[in-house]
Amino acid sequence: MVLGTLAAIIVGIWFVNTYVIRPSAITVVGEGKLSTKPEEVSLIVTRVDASSDIVGAIDQGEQSLNKLTATARTLATDAQIQKSFYRVSPSANGQYIVANAFSLKTKNVSQLGSLIKSLYQNGATTISNVSFTSADKDETDQEARLLAVKDAKEKARMIAKSAGKRLGRLISITDDNVAPASSVSTGTNIDIVKQVSVIYEIW
């Protein structure tokens, strides 16, 4: 009797493990986007100089850098400037190449266009890594993240529906821990974009 009951239990467990339908899982990437007013802008300014004399190349690079930082402070009096890159290297044509770069932060966002033009006019080789920061960065980042999660749920629901299934429970959310990307959307606002990866069960 006991052996028969035990055998029935084992068979029952095997049947459940074999034939009970388990939910599938889908992974979707949600994107949250909102528009806000920028409080600060940062950028990288690079200047490259060349000379057949290494001392002359270094001196020329310093003069060029001083001119550019002075230009930046004229248009952005609150500018935070920090030297971020310096390299001296020989070239194939016998000249020495001196590359200087500095980072610049300013709250004078409205003058960004004039600042960039003036920097190029005064010898900047490249201006890169232009990024904006909103007034309430933590709050804005969290709002963008919540919008991304909401977007992911809607995408998962649509995928499940198109497959003739229904959306199940949320399994996991993965934040890339990267600061939201920002880009100019109008003359006064910027778009903040955040992405998250979400896994849902579908039945």
Image: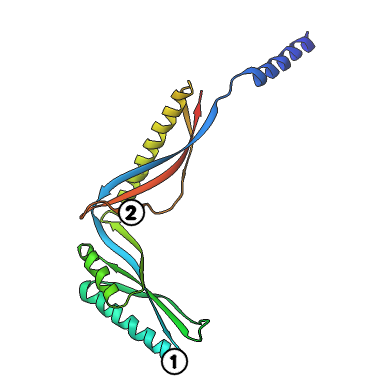
Q: Nearer the viewer, mark 1 or mark 2?
A: 1
SS under mark 1: helix
Residue 109, by quadrant, is bottom left
Name the side, left or right, on which 46 lies relative to 191.
Answer: right
Name the side, left or right, on which 38 lies relative to 165.
Answer: left
What amino acid is found at the position of numbered circle 2 in the picture? Ser
Quarter occupied by the N terminus: top right
> Which numbered disc, 1 or 2, marks the residue that appears first in the sequence?
1
* Residue found at the far front of this picture: 93
How many callouts does the rendering have?
2
Q: Which of the two residues, 77 or 12, is positioned nearer the viewer here?
A: 77
Which dot marks residue 74? none
Q: Which of the two residues, 28 or 128, is positioned nearer the viewer here?
A: 128
User: Label 1 to label 2, Cα distance in Å?
Assistant: 41 Å
Instruction: Please state the horizontal and vertical placement of residue 41, each as a whole percent of the image.
Output: 29, 63
Instruction: Please state the horizontal and vertical placement of residue 169, each as a whole percent of the image.
Output: 47, 29
What amino acid is found at the position of numbered circle 1 in the picture? Val
Q: Are marks 1 and 2 in contact (CB under 8 Å)?
A: no
61, above or below 174, in the image: below
Which dot marks residue 55? 1
Q: Going 45% across and 91% down the picture, which residue do you hit?
A: 53
Question: Neighbour class for label 1 at 10 Å: few (<14), some, many (≥20)?
Answer: few
Name the side, left or right, on which 155 lies relative to 184.
Answer: right
Residue 57, by quadrant, is bottom left
Q: Which of the two residues, 82 or 85, is positioned nearer the viewer here?
A: 85
Instruction: Please state the horizontal and vertical placement of residue 129, each as a whole percent of the image.
Output: 37, 63
Instruction: Please state the horizontal and vertical placement of residue 195, each as a whole percent of the image.
Output: 41, 45
**In this figure, which residue is indicated by the disc labeled 2?**
182
